[in-house]
Image: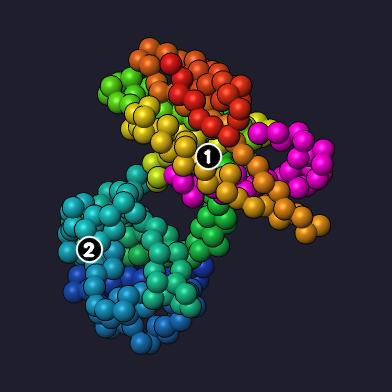
Amino acid sequence: MQFASDEEGIDLAQVLEGNPVATIVIDAQHRVTHWNRACAVLTGVPADEMIGTSDQWRAFYPDARSIMADLIVSGALETAVDALYHGKFRRSVLIEGAFEAEDFFPSFGVGGRWLYFTAAPLRNAVGEVIGAIETLQDVTERRRAEEALRQSEERYRNLSLVDSLTGLFNSRSLHERLQAEVERATRYSRPLSLLVLDCDNFKRINDNFGHLEGDRVLQALARVIGEGLRASDSAYRYGGEEFVVLLPETEADAGKRLAERLCRSFAAEVIPTSAGESIRCTVSIGVASYVPGETRDSLIRRADDAGYEAKRQGKNCVVLAG
């Protein structure tokens, strides 16, 4: 491929060879004409194995396919580029007919690498495409740092929504989720039920066995609740020894039956202490079904009042709010 005179061609080769950015140049027949030193270092493939061949794909893919420079030479439209780099590329804002992309190459190096690459057409004096130039940069460390930051932020968010003792969601998470479920139940006229559970005689347990053993009781209740729920249900530690269970798509009677199962399951639990003793505890549960037009606070309050009624009726039972 002749881009200029021999003397100018030498200058081009020198410029590319001295460029610290990995660079590939191909001609109109998709043959590699330049594979600079930075590209050889990045890919681990020496230039003498590539110059004059159309094997540029070999450094990046396990099977023959076009690299972005090949697409440029072929005059590919954006739809063709999208077929290979869907959601990972964009048009260059600086050079007409050029593209840039960022992608993960699983067959590149050990364990795969993230590369940022650009490809632009090379034209002769009359504007005809006579080749393409592609540059590549290894951005693996940046991507890993970004992913580590994302995971850290996700962990932080999860910690801010989860009760550390029981592993259930906390009250902040409850208010966010309950508001969304109330709005959904209102919009689509769908049923929604809510349980408020309160450990019976919990102060006595703390007084007799200590707060660490009281924590074991709360953890046992959280486990019983979690084992009794459907995938669409969610459970929350509302405060102290009080828990809330949110039951979308659940009528009041079905919610009451689930509450009764939880009540029986927890009453059957034998919770061992660190001193070798055993604790048995029960729970009182109030059940309320969403009434169109009421607020989330009203729904919780009605279930809470029903829970207090369960306490008055002797504890270890379920009361359905009117």
Q: Pick whichever, 217 or 231, lies toward us.
A: 217
Kindly identify the residue that appears in the image at 33 percent across and 70 percent down.
25
Kindly identify the residue that appears in the image at 54 percent across and 60 percent down.
144
Q: Is residue 88 magenta?
A: no
Which x, y percent locates residue 167?
Answer: 60, 46
Above or below, 8 against 256 in this view is below
Q: Nearer the viewer, mark 2 or mark 1?
A: 1
Q: Pick whichever, 44 or 134, lies toward us.
A: 44
Marker disc for residue 211: none
Above or below, 259 against 166 in this view is above
Which x, y percent locates residue 292?
Answer: 35, 15
Above or below, 163 against 31 in this view is above
How crowded is the residue under tag 2: few (<14 C-alpha within 10 Å), some, or many (20+)? many
What colouring method underlies this structural image?
A: rainbow
Kindly identify the residue that appears in the image at 45 percent across and 64 percent down.
114
The magenta segment: 200-229
Which image quarter: residue 214? top right
* Residue type indicated by callout 1: Cys
Marker disc for residue 71: 2
**Disc 1 secondary structure class:** helix
Tell me: 63 left or right of 243: left
Question: Spatial distance from mark 2 to mark 1, Cα to Cα?
Answer: 66 Å
In the picture as drawn, the residue positioned furthest to the front comes out as 314
Q: Pick whichever, 141 or 285, lies toward us.
A: 285
Q: Is residue 214 magenta?
A: yes
Asked whether residue 102 is in view, the answer is yes
Determine contact: label 2, label 1, CB under 8 Å: no
**Main secondary structure type of the part rendered in magenta:** helix
The quadrant the C terminus occupies is top left
Marker disc for residue 263: 1
Which image quarter: residue 256? top left
